[in-house]
Each structure stands twice: as structure tokens, then as C-alpha cells.
Image: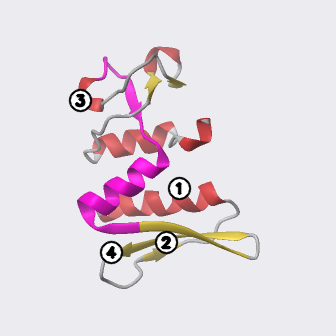
Amino acid sequence: MKKLFVPYDMALLAKEKGFDEKCLCIYMENENNRLQNLGGTYQNSLAYKDNLAAPLYQQLVDWFREKYLLSIEVSEWSKHFSGKIKPIGKSLKFQSADKSYYEALESALTEAFKLI
């Protein structure tokens, strides 16, 4: 289940860019940024000290689509994966070539943060 959540560095970038949605887990600063679920939900604006809300990959995909009208998707061909960003109603903005689904998704999300 851990791989459903974005890594710490991406969660930090999301917070810096204004992501403040409810999340199921949190990165605990006092435990070397270990992913934790203590029951309930977490938001960056309500987090204790340097703890950090840990969004699901899908939460960030939805956030980009809803807030910035950026469609993020991953496609597969011949055991290779491609992360893509397409502003809704416009032409392709970014395309990666990666070895795994999550690498491609991370590439696309990282690039999307550069666009906002």
C-alpha cells in the first residue's frame, strides 16, 4: 500500500505549491519522515510542526486536473511507460519514457509542478 502514496519529496513540493487536501497518511518528522496513519485524516494546514500530509498519487492527479486543468496520465507500450501532461483542450505539453508505471507517473507529476 505504501507505493500508493507519493514520496516525501513530492509531498513537500505539493505543500509548497498549495496542496492542502485531506490525506489518509502523514510523514512524521520526528520519525525520519516515516509514513504513518494514526487514524483519521491529515491536512498540511492542520499538521503538527514539521509533519507533512502524504497524498495518494491519484489525489495529486485529480488536484492538477481540477485546479489547473492539467490532465496527467500514464500509458504503456512494449514494457515501457510514458507519463504525459496535457492541458485540457490543448496539445501535449510533456511526455516521458520510463521503466515503470510509478516512475512515469512521478516524472509527469514533477513536470506538472514546474508548470504551476
Which residue position holds label 2? 84
* In the image, residue 78 above or below residue 68: below
Badge 3 or badge 1: first in the primary sequence:
3
3D distance between C-alphas at marks 1 and 4? 17 Å
3D distance between C-alphas at marks 2 and 1? 10 Å
Task: Characterize the local packing of mark 1: few (<14), some (14-19) or many (20 or more) Cα atoms within 10 angstroms.
Answer: many
> Looking at the rendered structure, which numbered label has been put on residue 106?
1
The magenta segment is 47-71
Question: Helix, strand, or loop for circle 2?
Answer: strand
- Give the percent coordinates (x, y) of residue 53: 38, 31
Q: Residue at x 39, y 39 (%)?
A: 12
Q: Residue at x 33, y 75 (%)?
A: 87
Task: Characterize the local packing of mark 4: few (<14), some (14-19) or many (20 or more) Cα atoms within 10 angstroms.
Answer: some
> Total label count?
4
Question: What scheme was used to colour the molecule?
Answer: secondary structure
Question: Helix, strand, or loop for circle 1?
Answer: helix
